[in-house]
Image (cartoon, helix red, strand yellow):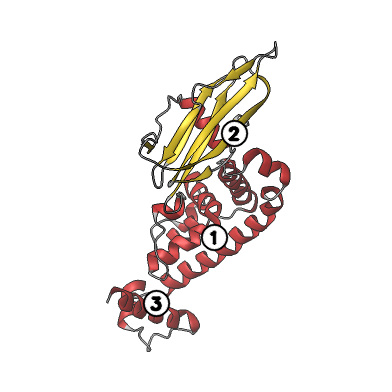
Amino acid sequence: MQFKRVSAVLAGCLALVAGPVLADNPAPPAAAWVTMGNANFYNASLRALVILFVMAILIESALAVIFNWRLFLELFYGRGVKTLVMIAVSALVVWTFNIDVVHTMLASYQLSDPSAGSDTLSRFLTALILAGGSSGVYQILVSLGYRQARTPEDIKPKPKNEKAWISVKVLRRSALGPVYVRISDAGAVTQDSPPQLAGVIAPTGFWSIVWSVFFLDRNRFPQAGGFEVDTAKQYKLDVSAKDSEGQVLEADINGLYTFGPGAIIDMRTTL
């Protein structure tokens, strides 16, 4: 019922945009409800959305050269740097070309004085909308009922059924050179196998979390995501390195493990 109502409203609004609206030809009730009796209301909104969509696509296409650059992927793949770059470039475009769609829309809705000119807040909001790119347009489609809302599973991937993810982070103290991470299949789970791990809560400082958001960790295996393991099997974990004297350093997390379905295990050790 709600989808039909939204469709009827949009159909009436598109009729207003498709052709001129004459004073003696009143808008349909649904369209009149959305436009508050004024066709310019929806016309201004549609024009603003088109401008934002085109500008967002242009910015995304221009920055794709940087985002797909191998050096960028090696340093920042899966990190939050891309968002900061999008915001910075969008703000630069807004201030350089004087694009203030938010102020224009508010003036069209008679919620702002057209002669007052743009202000910092409206320009910053315009820049944030542009930085949202195609995902921002997707959210608009969700609000209109034409797309389903993204679930937490879509935003943050999880292991498949009967699978788990494991990662190993090494904090270097005495280790020099490469650190060897070995994960070997030790056969099917038996009654003598250790209890299944559902998760690991490791002590993490605030700045370590901030750093991990923006930069890949070279002392983590794998550097992004997790190594997939089967929950029906047990695995032997062996992490080792050598110190300056050539002595082998064994990690305190070495041992036999089993993992629960959907578990994401982030192990930490100091070598």
Rendered view: 77 above or below 215: below
x%, y% of residue 44?
47, 68
Apparent side of residue 234 relative to residue 69 in the rendered image (left or right): left
Quadrant assignment for the N terminus: bottom left
Amino acid under disc 2:
Arg
Apparent side of residue 243 relative to residue 235 in the rendered image (left or right): right
Which quadrant of the structure image shows residue 147? bottom left
Q: Which residue is mark 3?
A: 10
Decide which of 262, 126 is in the foreground and name it: 262
Q: In front: mark 3 or mark 2?
A: 2
Q: Earlier in the sequence, mark 2 or mark 1?
A: 1
Amino acid under disc 1:
Ser
Distance Cα–Cα, label 3 vs label 2: 58 Å
Which quadrant of the structure image shows residue 179? top right
Amino acid under disc 3:
Leu
x%, y% of residue 213?
53, 36
Number of the label disc, if any, that sits on residue 182: 2
Residue 36 in view here? no
Number of the label disc, if any, that sits on residue 174: none
Residue drawn at point x = 43 percent, y = 71 percent:
42
Which quadrant of the structure image shows residue 51? bottom right
Residue drawn at point x = 39 percent, y = 85 percent:
23
Element type at marker 3?
Answer: helix
Q: Which residue is mark 1?
A: 134
Decide which of 5, 251 is in the foreground and name it: 251
